Image: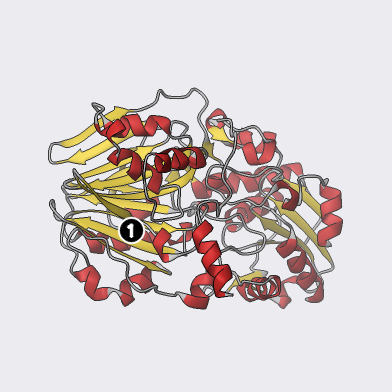
């Protein structure tokens, strides 16, 4: 661990295991990341680890923490899960002394699945060490990165997150009354940031509020988290959400608030947070996740009723909608699928054949539940359709007489540029196909999606959500979003040379 505290520990779960976590399960949207920060909390490193474990569902590729004692910032980062990182780096974590810190769990949307891209990223500037953790995706990253490099900046990672650190260190911004405000005004896209600087913790949310971020109180200190479930995990009390365009500073003088952008009448809160990403016990964007998903399921049943014998949800994110569907129809709800909890939520293998094997390992069918019965399968979303096709076939092999698929969200027809690594439009099953066509491809008797109208009807403030992946209309124009590996040319060249 260096004096100013930037530690690259040996990859936990690296090698083949690390590469397997580099992608996602066939038919699921890719996750983004989870943020957790503390201020004025004894044994900050321990609390950070507990909070990150509650956010593990938001990213499984890598995890890290950075802790400040008010003078020195030290960091520990590793590939793999939080528990793996903690076990393999126990001595280094025990040496992290301080009451201020930030933590991060990563799922890559920009940059390769590599240790150097794991966050928090820490750098030493003339005003001390800055550490940063980011959830989201900067849509003007290529332009800003090129501008920084033209001025002499040397980048150490393949992520878009590092751009903000270079801007904060550049004289153009340092000379401003508020360098952070000036830098943030140039960023476009989705970003929730946690910044650690000396004796100060800073939380930032983009002008549209794409990604969630909330404030909690723990004893005499404060906690910042991507989801409220992480506050509960450490015993913190929920206070409020960080507002879009807000900078919240927590320092020796208490909490201070400023804005870098005016509030938008039509915000861009990601509706997929409620559909899939967030944990059911979280509350975000002013709504309880589980109860909202139950309402989606009820509405889905109203829009697409079917004669059947049993409702079986896809665990875990389809369960709440499955409950709603069963309640509305009066059909029994049963465990037709059992999830193997020892397979990671985003488990993947390098080749397509191995990805298929991974999908088969993740869920097992309870044949006695489906044999000789008409089955309704409820899931949260359908992206490519490859996995659901295998599920339908497996249900028929187990003896289901009919299989009706119900999706508790509208058809995904457009890519996301704001932190969800959806495939290109050509890979999306619903981009050019009607539900009946998709039903035939996946082998289902019928397929029904929750309508966009139905989805919006269940949201308390529908105008505050981004539904671009369903409509192609985004809160903010996207001129030229960089591909995921756009900033990894040297890594790619090295890999090719190694082959």
Residue 203 position within the rendered picture, expressed as x and y whole percent measured from the top left: 31, 41
Q: Nearer the viewer, residue 22 or 346?
A: 22
Q: Is residue 342 above or below residue 402?
A: below
Residue at horizontal 43 percent and vertical 45 percent from the top: 283
Q: Position of residue 310 (x, y in %)?
A: 73, 62
Q: In the displayed structure, would residue 311 be above or below residue 90?
A: above
The residue lying at 40 percent from left, 62 percent from top is 116
67 horizontally vs 492: left or right: left
Q: Quadrant of the C terminus?
A: bottom right
Q: Secondary structure at mark 1?
A: helix
Q: Nearer the viewer, residue 171 or 43?
A: 171
User: Going by the image, does 392 lie left or right of 365?
Assistant: right
What's the colour scheme? Answer: secondary structure
In the rendered view, would you say 259 is above or below 66? Answer: above
Q: Residues within 10 Å of mark 1 (few under 14, many from 20)?
A: many
Q: Position of residue 37 (x, y in %)?
A: 29, 51
Provide the residue designation for mark 1: 51
The one nearer the camera, 193 or 339, is: 193
Quarter of the rendering containing residue 14: bottom left
Question: Where residue 345 sits: x, y (%)?
Answer: 54, 65
**Which residue is located at x 12 percent, y 52 percent?**
71
Number of callouts: 1
Residue 308 seen? yes
Q: Quadrant of the N terminus?
A: bottom left
Please tell me which residue lies in front, 421 or 222: 421
Residue 214 showing in the rendered view: no
Left or right: residue 256 compared with residue 334: left
């Amino acid at each position: 661990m260096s004096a100013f505290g930037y530690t690259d520990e040996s990859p936990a779960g690296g090698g083949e295991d690390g590469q397997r976590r580099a992608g996602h399960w066939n038919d699921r949207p890719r996750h983004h990341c989870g943020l957790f920060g503390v201020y004025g909390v004894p044994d900050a490193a321990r609390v950070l680890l507990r909070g990150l474990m509650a956010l593990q569902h938001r990213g499984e590729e890598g995890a890290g923490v950075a802790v400040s004692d008010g003078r020195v910032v030290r960091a520990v980062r590793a590939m793999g899960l939080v528990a793996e990182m903690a076990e393999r780096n126990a001595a280094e974590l025990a040496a992290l002394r301080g009451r201020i810190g930030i933590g991060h769990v990563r799922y890559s949307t920009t940059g390769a699945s590599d240790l150097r891209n794991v966050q928090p990223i820490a750098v030493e500037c003339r005003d001390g060490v800055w550490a940063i953790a980011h959830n989201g995706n900067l849509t003007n990253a290529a332009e800003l990165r090129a501008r920084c490099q033209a001025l002499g900046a040397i980048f150490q990672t393949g992520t878009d997150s590092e751009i903000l650190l270079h801007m904060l260190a550049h004289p153009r911004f340092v000379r401003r009354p508020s360098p952070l405000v000036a830098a943030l005004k140039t960023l476009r896209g989705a970003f929730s940031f946690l910044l650690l600087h000396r004796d100060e913790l800073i939380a930032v949310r983009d002008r549209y509020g794409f990604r969630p971020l909330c404030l909690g109180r723990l004893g005499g200190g404060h906690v910042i988290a991507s989801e409220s479930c992480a506050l509960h995990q450490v015993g913190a009390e929920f206070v409020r959400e960080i507002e879009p365009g807000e900078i919240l500073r927590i320092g020796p003088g208490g909490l201070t608030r400023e804005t870098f952008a005016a509030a938008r009448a039509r915000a861009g809160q990601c509706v997929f947070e409620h559909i899939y990403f967030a944990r059911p016990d979280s509350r975000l964007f002013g709504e309880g996740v589980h109860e909202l998903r139950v309402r989606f399921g009820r509405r889905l049943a109203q829009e697409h009723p079917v004669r059947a014998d049993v409702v079986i949800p896809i665990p875990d994110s389809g369960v709440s909608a499955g409950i709603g569907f069963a309640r509305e129809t009066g059909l029994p709800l049963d465990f037709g699928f059992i999830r193997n909890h020892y397979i990671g939520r985003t488990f993947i293998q390098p080749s397509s054949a191995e990805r298929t094997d991974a999908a088969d390992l993740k869920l097992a069918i309870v044949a006695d539940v489906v044999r000789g019965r008409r089955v309704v399968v409820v899931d949260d979303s359908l992206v490519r359709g490859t996995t659901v096709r295998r599920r339908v076939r497996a249900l028929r092999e187990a003896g289901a007489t009919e299989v009706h698929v119900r999706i508790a969200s509208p058809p995904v027809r457009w890519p996301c540029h704001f932190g969800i690594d959806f495939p290109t439009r050509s890979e999306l099953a619903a981009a050019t196909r009607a539900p009946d066509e998709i039903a035939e491809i996946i082998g289902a008797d019928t397929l029904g999606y929750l309508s966009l109208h139905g989805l919006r009807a269940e949201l308390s403030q529908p105008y505050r959500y981004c539904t671009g992946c369903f409509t192609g209309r985004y809160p903010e124009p996207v001129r030229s979003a960089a591909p995921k590996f756009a900033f990894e040319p040297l890594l790619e060249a090295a890999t090719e040379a190694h082959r």
